[in-house]
Image (cartoon, rainbow, N blue to C red):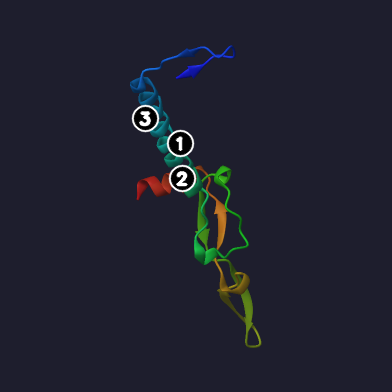
Amino acid sequence: MIVAPDGATEPVETSKVQHYLARRSRWQAEEDTRIEEIKARGKVPDLCGPEIPEAPARGAFRVFEPQGLYPDGAEGWVSKPSGYRGRKAIEHADAFDQMEAQAR
């Protein structure tokens, strides 16, 4: 029933209300799925650590291991991973990174 400001009532078919609620429920499910997909795009892998914030607007990125040169004896140098606390880092993926990923 719809009640007007003056107190008059108007019957409403139950099927119309149920139809509206069903449409709204489907829309809400589609919207929830869409939002989850967007959030998944911004998820940072656990091996990078919690310091890198999740940001769906960041776009495509690749994970890499930072390397540093450390002294090895009197005259030598050796390359070792140098990520913060042994973690990996992320880097914005440019067009060449995306082409390489598509080629694989």
The residue at the point 41 percent across, 36 percent down is: 30
Residue depth check, mark 3 versus mark 1: number of the one nearer the observer: 3
- SS assignment at label 3: helix
The residue at the point 33 percent across, 22 percent down is: 15
The reply to whether the C-beta atoms of the residues labelled 2 and 1 are less than 8 Å apart is no
Using the rendered view, name the quadrant where residue 52 is placed.
Answer: bottom right
* Residue beneath disc 1: 31
* Residue beneath disc 3: 22
Instruction: List x then y, in percent, for residue 33.
Output: 42, 41
Instruction: List x then y, in percent, for residue 21.
Output: 40, 29
Q: Disc 2 and disc 1: Cα gap in Å?
A: 9 Å
Front residue of this view, candidates 69 and 19: 19
Above or below, comparing residue 32 to residue 53 in the picture: above
Q: Is 29 situated left or right of 87 in this image?
A: left
* Residue beneath disc 2: 36
Front residue of this view, candidates 15 and 24: 15
Front residue of this view, candidates 9 and 82: 9
- SS assignment at label 2: helix
Going from N to C along the chain, the mark reached first, 3 or 2, is: 3
